[in-house]
Image: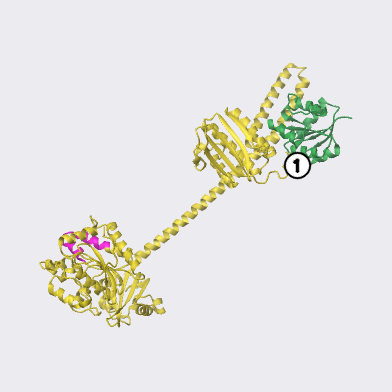
Chain colours: A yellow, B green
Amino acid sequence: MFPPFLPHDTSACPCKSEKLTFRTIPGEQLQYDVQLCNSKEFLIDVLSQRIGRVLFVDEPALAFATASQWPNAREIIDMLACGGAFEESGFHLPIGDALRAMSGLAVGHLPGVFALGEIVALLWAQGRGHEAIRLERLWNDLAKKYPFSLLRRYVAFVFSNTNQVESFLAMDGEQSHVMHGKPLEDCRGLRSGERLRAISPWERKAVPLECGISGEAEDQFRLLVEAVEDYAIFMLDPRGYVRTWNIGAQRIKQYDASEIIGKHFSCFYPEEDVRKGKPEWALVIAEKQGRYEDEDWRLRKDGSKFWANVIITAVRNRKGELVGFGKVTRDVTERMRAQRKLEAEVAERRDAERQLHASEESLRQLSRHLLRTQDEERRQIGRDLHDSLGQYLAVLKMKLDSLSETFGPREKAVAQDLAHCVHLTEGCIKEVRTASYLLYPPMLEELGLTSAIPWYLDGFSSRSGIKTTFTAEANFGRISRDSELALFRVLQEGLTNVHRHSQSERAYVRLASADGFCTLEIADEGVGMPAQLLDQPGEEMITFGVGLRGMSERMRQLGGRLEIVPNDTGATLRAIVPTGEPWPPGFLDRAAF
Amino acid sequence: MPVRVLIVDDHEIVREGISQLIARSRPEWLICGQASNGEQAIELAQTLLPDVVILDISMPKINGLQVAARIADMHLRCRVLMFTMHESERLARDVRAAGAQGVVLKSQASRDLIRAVDHLLAGDTFFDSSGD
């Protein structure tokens, strides 16, 4: 990984350092940070100052370079490659961290990154062409991820003879922090032509830059800028006419240098922007504030639009006079599209979540409705059985009894038949009563839980063989009809559960009320119940129609809850519901319980 | 003076069954009135002043226990016998609490009803079919 980022550490002496260091170089009008490596710092210093002065006034910069010394170069390469092939994670993470740290230093400015390109050249020379390409791509990808200005591919080896270096250094004068490094001697054996051929894409014809750089240095700088493919980097004169052009500009905007130089840069703007005077306004802002940044649609030569990140920087000479504008344009259409796609996906997902919530809610409503309908229907059927069939059977038995009394003493055969009929009728009455009470005990409505529960427990015990004990608070009166019915259903479900699953031989039912809530507890001495039974639907648990989960839902509807808690000997099912208005209203007063 | 009986049940067939049972076993008794709901029962109890009210528990609106409680509140001299399909130990307690003096299961009417009314007329209660 990269060494820690040490902003503004001026104490580090680059010429002595064999590792990457970081330092700040205060210039006359500019301050930027340069990350240097081993022994070619001087070169980087000079070039970084130049580049920074022309295009990135007052902006921090991150620069990488390697010397031609093979061991050190490998070290740098290995460092960037993170010990393996050039991978996105190993490369982007540390550099990304450095960029973020620099963004923090330069509020409102993009950090500049200068990758001075021997790394790629060396890889190429080592026959690691695919890795060189991979590294180039990583730089491109990095530029898409982080907001920074990237200049790269500097051909360091054009300085491979001392004369060139001396004249280049002379231009920089006293401002430079030039250190004469040893590696220069080592470079002598290599011809720049060989290096340039190895990295031939950089051999481009340059358009002269009128920015105060002259001579050989101008050529090198021009080479550097015009070779950049991913950015349109060009100069405007103070009125906005295009003065220089690079490969990136040609690629992004489709104009050849010969077509566009001398034209006004407003031709890159959509018509409505031109009408509003946006191009002129951009120059005014850049001149006044030193810099103008924009993200918007721009036009290519064929009229198609692309989403552009544009930075216009005022360029001044040493006297402070405006000599033109540097313009750096990136095509970030894909990034923008990816962003919008992401936004659309997020919106879609939110939409799906909303729909899910809605369908969950409607399922819940449906379940409430089903519970209510089921209750109502059971009540109706139970009532019908009890009220009509039950009554008829009762009267039928009365009549049969009467017939037995009348005819029995006289005719033995008739008496036997009648006795049989009475027996059958009694059986019918019992069946009807059991069925109707299971469906909806009329006793519950008329006498409340304290009567209905013991009655139900009697029946349950005789059917299941499980002994039951019921305790209710002495003063437990009537509660709301809904709560009574809900608790009764919980009792039915709970006991069925005890019978089917707990293997308990006893069940304890307790009824109590306090503070506007009443509690029904069904405790067993069985194998226990997992609490998630209340939340998970499972056929196993669906016993009396809707199961414990349905009961839990019903409790929630009433503003109560259903819990399963382990007790000393088994499990306790506890239902808690608000007492509510007693039903029927006023009954308690008159009945004088 | 014949014994005056008021029969209250929301099913006509049940009222008729009781009437016939009484007519056969105690022809000297007078069915002074019949009511098919609680409100009517309270009204007739007040106006007819029966000796005994045979009162069904399960009725719409005002049930038998409520009617019994109202009659008890009015301090009439009549005795109230609940007549029901329900079968529960606790029922006796509820019936007592409502102010009635006895309870008979409909399925045991032939065996118990007349006996129960006799008990009540004698000033006793009837809460256990074995004879109280």
Which of the two residues, A282 or A179, is positioned nearer the viewer here? A179
- The extreme right residue here reads B1
The residue stretch that appears in magenta = A117-138
Rendered location of residue B116, percent (x, y)? 78, 27
**Label 1 SS:** helix
Which subunit holds the residue at mark 1? A
Q: Main secondary structure of the magenta part?
A: helix
Rendered location of residue A261, percent (x, y)? 27, 79
- The extreme front residue here reads A11
Q: Looking at the image, can residue A273 be seen?
A: yes
Q: Locate the C terminus of chain B and report the quarter of the image it occupies.
A: top right
Horizontal relation, residue A493 to residue A388: left or right: left
Q: What residue is disc 1 on?
A: A590
Q: Looking at the image, can residue B87 be seen?
A: no
Amino acid type, callout 1 = Arg
Which of the two residues, A28 or A403, is positioned nearer the viewer here? A28
Which of the two residues, A169 or A522, is positioned nearer the viewer here? A169
Q: Quadrant of residue A20?
A: bottom left
- The extreme left residue here reads A189
Horizontal relation, residue B60 to residue A114: left or right: right
Rendered location of residue A235, percent (x, y)? 28, 77
Rendered location of residue B29, percent (x, y)? 85, 29
| Mark 1 crowd level (few <14, some 14–19, many ≥20, 10 Å Cα) | some
